[in-house]
Image (tube, rainbow, N blue to C red):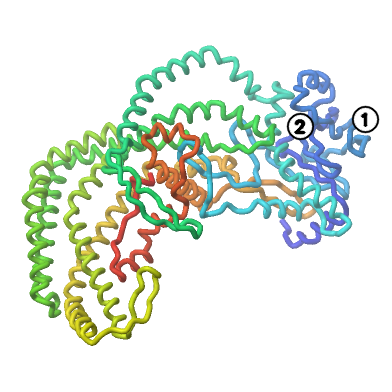
Amino acid sequence: MNHNNYNNKNNQISKSKNNIIFWPNDIKLTNASERYLILGYRIDQFTVVVIDIIVKEDYREISNKTDKDIFRNIEILTSINCKIRKCHQHSHNHLYEVQYDFVKNQPILNNNQTIIFFKPPNSSNLEYFSLDPIKINIFWNNNNQIGELIFRRPSTRKYADKLLKHFSDSDNDDDDNLSLIGENSREILRIINLTNYIRVRINANRFNRGNIFNTFNCCIPYYEVMFNLVAMFYYIFIQKTCYLLSSILTYPVLKLNFKYKVSNDGKSTDKNKTNISLSSLSFMIHQINFRAKQLYNLPLQFKKLRYSKLESEASIIKDAKFSPSEYIKFYNTVWLIMNDLLLGVVFTTILKNHHHTILRVFEKIVVEYHVLLSNTITWLMNSPAGFKLNNELASFMGQLILWVLDFWKQNILKFLISNSDDILITIEIFSQYFGLSIGISMILDLFNIFILSINGFYVASTRIYCWQLNILRSLFKLFYGKKYNVLRNRVDSKDYEFDQLMLGIIIFTILIYLLPTVFIFYLTFIIARLTILILNFTLKLLLISLNHLPIVAFLLKLKNQDRLPGGVVLDCEFYTDDYRITLHSKSLSICEIVTSHINSMLNFNKFNLNAQDTKSFVENLRADKINELYTIDDVVNNWDRISIVTIVKNVVIGEIIKDYDYKEMF
């Protein structure tokens, strides 16, 4: 293959107004003496799309069977081994006989003709060409709309520009040709996407697969009866149960009516705090509620998938947007549920095989946890690492923490140790029958109970450290005659009396000397808090992977990339005496799949945040549009809590390090 001649060949192609012919690469003609007719669509006076080649003698029979309404624009473009005349709306009213190379299986072109080969996509298999990348959206809500996105999808204009460079020349006198091709690029792809569908409709006997409409209709009686019976059983015993269960779990048991200020597009607005339900109090209850929602929505997903073949091809005919998103969404949901159940069985087997070992390790961890905390606090009370701290303050804080730890050990840790066998058996049973996600949710709940004392110590030490920093900052302004104006939110000049300055100096000195002691305790619990965040984040990440991983999209990437169109590509291959231009569908890359999935997840998070103010799960499903108190910026800010920059900033200024709200956003 000679790539050095690319520019010369390309210039020769574009020196005049070229006739562009889109030719299916699966057409194979073997009988050189047979008379053939080439059928297709004439996009404009320079562009045609070939659909199929049929024997001339079969044309009359096929034309009588063809749906005139759907195929009213299809015509005989030219012929092979015969001549035929046909008038049509374009300027070329004489359809000449074309010469065909039966060795290469392609027509012999003139100097002003360019042929572009394409592989006809199987529309019934949800394959198609598209200038716009498909959106990977496996999440389910009432509108399933992708609203405002942080990661914007690439502009489709660049794909049209690439097509223009190949389809037309750059001379000024050919600007009309360039504009025509540019405007018709989507129409060209629409016709190409219909190639297999049209072939089946005009000549069902030529292909192995029959008319999808007839194939579907022939099995309607038995299929419909079985489907209706299964649907009725599912609706009565499963869907209604999920309906009732999710309504109970999402019903607000506590309403917090206080307001807080939020900046939205430069304006300050008041927002009510969300309601608190059972699903927001426990990871296990939240996971049960999520699974109930999945099972409740599954019939509607299947109903859409059931007609996906017909809907997809009908959408191409109507020139409407379509994508295999319902296919991906339904099978991704089923796959994740089955995968969760299978992993739950494996997880249960591991727990049962190592039941006594796990109990011993758990008891040892609980004891070591209490001993480590007690020894650390005792060490901080007695000049840690040789640093001289304030003995009275260190002793006061240390004894208070030790008293809480002793109370925690006598009431909580002892209860966990004495009931560890029952707890482990409960986790095994729930994991075996409800999946690995339930087991991880129960572990998360136990973990949060287990480290509740550390979280309390962290919040207390952080508040003390933050208050001390704020007081020192205010007193420092006092020394150079400044004062913070709360009403105007600014720093103003202020003249202080001598006794005010003296009192400020005394308080400032005391706080400065107490700051190292407070900081040491603060730093200790900062380390503990970060360790807890890492463990918490790991378990939540496992839950997100089990519930929301786009595994079907990744499998389609490996198995059938044509179902994940991300644009079109023109490949030009040069040989010693010839060249070949092929139109390919550019599939989504792994990075694009992940980016699109993140976009969908952010909108799913926004939907769930806004759905908290409604009374129940059922209202969320039936609502045409939920009042959007939260925006994408609020979702991003929620995720931004666990970013390294935010954590470092909060550590320095003494703010509490918060985790993202998993139960509220998922």
Q: Is residue 505 left or right of residue 629?
A: left
Asked if the residue at tag 1 contacts the one at tag 2, i.e. Cβ–Cβ closer than 8 Å, the answer is no
Characterize the local packing of mark 1: few (<14), some (14-19) or many (20 or more) Cα atoms within 10 angstroms: few
The three-letter code of the residue at mark 1 reads Arg
Q: CA distance from mark 2 to mark 1?
A: 19 Å
* Residue 517 place in picture, x, y as percent: 16, 74
> At which x and y percent is residue 369?
13, 57
Task: Report whether 409 appears left or right of 625.
Answer: left
What SS does tag 1 mark?
loop
State which quadrant residue 38 falls in.
top right
Identify the residue position indicated by label 1 in the image: 85
Kind of residue at badge 2: Asp
Residue 280 visible here: yes
Question: Where does label 2 land, which residue?
Answer: 52
Give SS at disc 2: strand
Task: Name the quadrant of the C terminus.
Answer: top left
